[in-house]
């Protein structure tokens, strides 16, 4: 890869810096947003290689946000980190290791995030 993959990380959890730093250390350019509203103002088609949403703060709002992205931009790579079952194929556990594996998989087009979540 010539340039770093760009990840928009929507996360307001107290341990968000752990996820941010872990992804940066793996060579990704991470652009954090603390809220869905902030992310909406930064989401432009093709602006990010991957959008990662931490759903543990407000699960329902995160699901709605991800559904909105899917409707408007169905090919946008998307992950939702959650400790709850959302019924969405792009949901992964929110621990740093699971997120990192799912990000790598999503950006390399290997396996669906759900495959990784069920394997953990």
Image (tube, rainbow, N blue to C red):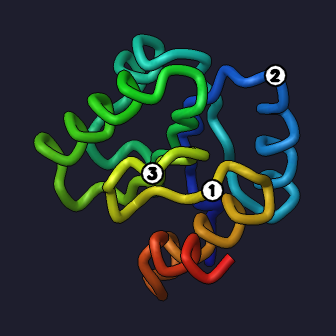
**Quadrant location, the N terminus:** bottom right
Tell me the distance, in whole angstroms, between the alpha carbons under discs 1 and 2.
16 Å
Q: Secondary structure at mark 3?
A: loop
Which residue appears at 65% of the width and 61% of the height? 4
Residue of label 3:
85
Tell me the distance, in whole angstroms, between the alpha carbons under discs 3 and 2.
21 Å
Q: Residue furthest front?
A: 85
Alpha-carbon neighbours of circle 2 within 10 Å: few (<14), some, or many (≥20)? Answer: few
User: Can you say whether 115 is above or below 56 in the image?
Assistant: below
Q: Residue furthest left?
A: 71
Disc number for residue 93: 1
Q: Secondary structure at mark 1?
A: loop
Alpha-carbon neighbours of circle 1 within 10 Å: few (<14), some, or many (≥20)? Answer: many
Drawn side of residue 103 relative to residue 85, left or right: right
Residue of label 2:
14
* Between discs 3 and 1, the one toward the N terminus: 3
User: Can you say whether 116 is above or below 86 in the image?
Assistant: below
- Could you say where residue 86 lies in the image, as x and y percent from the top left? 38, 48
Q: Are marks 3 and 2 in contact (CB under 8 Å)?
A: no
Drawn side of residue 64 relative to residue 19, left or right: left
User: Can you say whether 25 is above or below 33 in the image?
Assistant: below
* Between discs 1 and 2, the one toward the N terminus: 2
* Between discs 3 and 2, the one toward the N terminus: 2
Which of the 4 quarters of the picture holds residue 36? top left
- Could you say where residue 69 lies in the image, as x and y percent from the top left? 24, 40
- Could you say where residue 11 lies in the image, as x and y percent from the top left? 63, 28
The foreground one among 96 and 83 is 83
The foreground one among 49 and 16 is 16
């Amino acid at each position: 890869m010539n340039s770093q993959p760009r990840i928009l990380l929507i996360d307001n959890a107290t341990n968000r810096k752990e996820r941010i730093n872990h992804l940066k250390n793996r060579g990704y350019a991470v652009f954090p947003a603390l809220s869905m509203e902030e992310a909406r103002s930064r989401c432009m088609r093709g602006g990010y290689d991957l959008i990662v949403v931490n759903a543990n703060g407000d699960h329902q709002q995160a699901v709605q946000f991800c559904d909105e992205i899917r409707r408007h931009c169905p090919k946008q790579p998307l992950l939702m980190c959650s400790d709850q079952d959302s019924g969405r194929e792009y949901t992964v556990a929110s621990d740093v290791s699971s997120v990192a594996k799912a990000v790598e998989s999503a950006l390399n087009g290997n396996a669906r995030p759900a495959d990784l979540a069920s394997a953990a």
